[in-house]
Amino acid sequence: AQHFLARIDAHRGLNAFVATDPEATLAQARAADAAIAAGNAGPLAGVPIAHKDIFVTRDFPTTAGSKMLQGYRSPFDATTVARLAAAGAVTLGKLNCDEFAMGSSNENSAYGAVQNPWDATRIPGGSSGGSAAAVAARLAPAVTGTDTGGSIRQPAAFCGVTGIKPTYGRASRYGMVAFASSLDQAGPMARSAEDCALLLSSICGPDLDRDSTSLDRPAEDFGRSLNDSLDGLRIGVPKEFFGDGLAADVRAALDAALKEYEKLGARLVEISLPRTELAIPVYYIIAPAEASSNLSRFDGVKFGHRAAQYGDLLDMYKKTRAEGFGDEVKRRIMVGTYVLSHGYYDAYYLKAQQIRRMIADDFQQAFASCDVIAGPVAPTVAWKLGDKSDDPVANYLADIYTLPGSLAGLPGMSLPAGFGDSGMPVGLQLLGNYFGEAKLLNAAHRFQ
Ligand code: GLN
């Protein structure tokens, strides 16, 4: 823990961490030492990790990347935080992210952008940008992130690390500051699939009393089949993921990775996910709709920011929310309330839900002829800081390959698969069928 705390201090310029508290960290480390000495150490005893600042923590402040929660301290730990602590992990601090996890570049954080450790002039990806940058810069051996529409997979790809988002419902959402509740999932990011498997085994499991969408599916040892042979594995390659929008250098790296899989005994099968393009409009209706509802709790009454000067109650709400939320969050609240409003609900929200179902059905059809699906995580490597910060739609379009799996609730991961022309890392996305996490980790581990 001391080693990593020193590295965090030496690399403050990356802006990956938004909160550290060496005393709190070292107290947790001593408790882990005591557990080891007493012979009841958990599987992660003494392993230093860090949490995306979307997870509420008792020992550290929680901001969700927003000015709205500046100075907020939760009276309880998120289930993911509590489970990793119970396994013996030691918390180094909290990691920068896009405000309320809304973004693809980490530039929407109220606490400033994060630098990509491979090239400080580039974004680390988002919304779990601080998480990915911390692992890439060796500021933590493993971290947590959250993925609503790609926020674990895309920053992992852009920073050359490995990350996995489990099947929707396997990781508890309790204590994760809510963005889009039907999509939000927690997951680990680390240097290898093997390390991800270790963390994921502690994170997953039912939390039925605290999360109404938690699945009653027992925890598993996701590392049990890491070394299984890939002989005969059918890898589905969706033709829609390799179309015009994909940069040539990313495509070249992925083609090489797929060849490598063939050498490992896998068989490539062409598949079709015909509604891939529709995932963008569908997600950017459903996610803002849910966000507009979830964010109504930030009213200046119960917690977080409250405007200093105001007239009546309505004025207090208005000034508090105008001051506390950033531009992207306000944009999503406006889109969300619009698509849910009387007269537009049928045309937008209901239609989006219908197409969401069709996207999930397309995957089931695809999985009839393959075991896992492989493709890009993002159309390009990490872009330059500032390049898309004035263009929300350009950010949304770059989510095209991660959104379909999110809408279907499927497990997905990103693993490093070479480099683009600029020398920046390229990620390979693997998508599995429901509860296919162990298969994904096996496929990633054999490749690594
Ligand atoms: N980039 C997507 C968005 O802005 C996904 C973010 C996420 O997964 N949290 O909504």
Image (cartoon, rainbow, N blue to C red):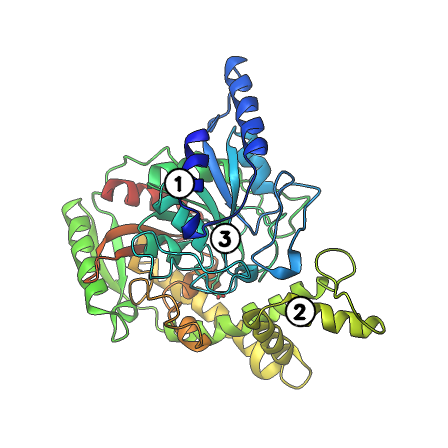
161 sits left or right of 50 in the view: left
- Rendered residue at 52%/28% (across/down): 88
Badge 1: how crowded within 10 Å, few (<14), some, or many (20+)?
A: many
**Residue 324, x across and y down, in percent:** 65, 65
Badge 3: how crowded within 10 Å, few (<14), some, or many (20+)?
A: many
Q: Cβ(mark 1) to ligand 1 < 8 Å?
A: no
For discs 2 and 1, the disc positioned in front in the rendered view: 2
Could you give the CA–CA distance between mark 3 and mark 2, rounded to whole angstroms? 20 Å
Q: Cβ(mark 2) to ligand 1 < 8 Å?
A: no
The disc placed on residue 323 is 2
| Residue type, mark 2 in image | Glu
Residue marked by disc 1: 196
- Toward the viewer: 121 or 332? 121
Q: Is residue 411 visible?
A: no
- Rendered residue at 46%/33% (across/down): 48
64 sits left or right of 73 in the view: left
| Residue type, mark 1 in image | Cys
| Residue type, mark 3 in image | Asn
